[in-house]
C-alpha cells in the first residue's frame, strides 16, 4: 500500500523491483489538480508557480511506467489511481477510508474483467496450537508441498505474547480442506477453532516457551513485550 506522503517509498521501491521507471503520469496530475480542494487554513498555493509544495504534490503523480504497468481509476470522485506493476501487483493507498473505497472499486473492475471468480468461495480453517512456529515448520512445509497441487495454502501465524499460535488452511475445495483438519490437529497438538482467541485463557497475556508438548515458564523479555502490547492505547 502507498501512503501518498512525502516520505512514502512504495512507488519508487516497486518501480525498481519490477524495472518500471517512475514517470509523471499526466492524467493523474491533471485529476489531482482538478479534484484537489484547499483546506480553509491552508497556505496560498498556485499550481502554475514552481514551489516545494508543487514538487511534493507532483511526486504523488510519479507512477511506475512501462509495458507491464497500468493505471486504473476506480472512483469518479477521487484522483488517486490504482497503479499496477508486473500486470498483477496492484498498489493501493494506505489511508484506511480511501483504501476501502478503491478496493471496492477495484473489485468491480476485476469481476468485470472476469479476473475474479466470485462463485468459487474459499474455505478457511483455523487450528489453534500451543506449539511454537519452529516446532511445526517442517511438518507445515511438507504439507504445503503436498497440497499445493490442490490450490491449498497453509499459513502459520505467531501470536506474540500469547500462549497459542494459529495455523490456517485455505482453499476452494472445501471437502479436501476439511480432510486435512484431523492430520493438522494431530501433528500440531492443536484444535480447530472459529476464532484464534477462542482457547485463550481470560486475563492471560503471557509468552510461553513450548518444546514438544511441554510448556515451560514464561520467557521474561517476551512477557514484558506482551505487557506493553496489552497496555498500548491507540490514538492517545
Image (cartoon, rainbow, N blue to C red):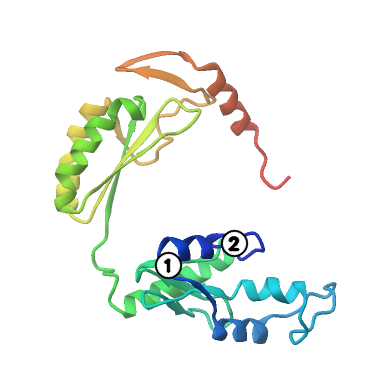
Element under label 2? loop
Residue in front for this viewpoint, 72 or 16: 16
Q: Tell me which residue sits at (17%, 54%) in the image.
A: 173
* Residue 2 against residue 229 in the figure, above or below: below
Q: Where in the figure is residue 184, as x and y percent of width and height?
A: 22, 33
Name the quadrant of the C terminus.
top right
The relative height of residue 154 versus residue 226 in the rendered view (above or below) is: below
Give the residue at mark 2: 3
* SS at badge 1: strand
Q: Is residue 107 left or right of residue 23?
A: left
Residue 1 visible, this angle: no
Say left or right for 171 vs 60: left
Residue drawn 61% across and 86% down?
30
Picture quadrant where residue 61 is located = bottom right
Q: Is residue 115 visible?
A: yes
Give the residue at mark 1. 90
198 w.r.t. 71: above or below: above
Q: Position of residue 210 (x, y in %)?
A: 37, 19
| Residue at screen point 15% across, 52% down | 150
> Could you say where residue 169 lies in the image, as x and y percent from the top left?
27, 44
Amino acid at each position: 500500500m502507498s501512503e501518498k506522503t512525502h516520505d512514502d517509498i512504495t512507488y519508487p521501491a516497486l518501480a525498481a523491483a519490477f524495472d518500471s521507471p517512475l514517470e509523471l503520469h499526466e492524467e493523474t496530475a491533471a485529476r489531482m489538480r482538478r479534484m484537489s480542494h484547499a483546506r480553509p487554513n491552508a497556505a496560498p498555493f498556485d499550481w502554475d508557480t514552481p514551489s516545494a509544495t508543487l514538487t511534493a504534490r507532483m511526486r504523488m503523480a510519479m507512477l511506475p511506467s512501462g509495458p507491464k504497468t497500468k493505471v486504473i481509476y476506480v472512483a469518479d470522485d477521487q484522483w488517486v489511481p490504482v497503479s499496477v506493476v508486473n500486470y498483477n501487483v496492484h498498489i493501493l493507498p494506505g489511508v484506511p477510508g480511501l483504501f476501502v473505497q478503491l478496493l471496492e472499486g477495484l473489485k468491480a473492475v476485476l469481476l468485470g474483467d472476469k479476473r475474479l471468480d466470485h462463485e468459487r468461495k474459499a474455505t478457511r480453517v483455523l487450528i489453534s496450537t500451543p506449539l511454537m512456529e519452529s516446532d511445526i515448520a517442517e511438518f507445515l512445509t511438507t504439507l504445503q508441498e503436498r497440497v499445493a497441487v490442490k490450490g491449498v495454502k497453509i499459513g502459520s501465524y505467531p501470536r506474540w505474547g500469547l500462549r497459542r499460535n494459529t495455523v490456517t488452511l485455505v482453499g476452494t475445495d472445501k471437502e479436501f480442506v476439511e480432510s486435512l483438519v484431523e492430520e493438522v490437529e494431530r501433528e500440531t497438538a492443536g484444535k480447530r477453532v472459529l476464532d484464534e482467541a477462542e482457547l485463550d485463557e481470560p486475563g492471560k497475556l503471557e509468552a510461553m516457551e513450548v518444546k514438544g508438548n511441554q510448556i515451560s515458564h514464561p520467557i521474561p523479555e517476551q512477557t514484558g513485550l506482551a505487557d506493553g502490547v496489552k497496555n498500548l492505547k491507540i490514538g492517545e
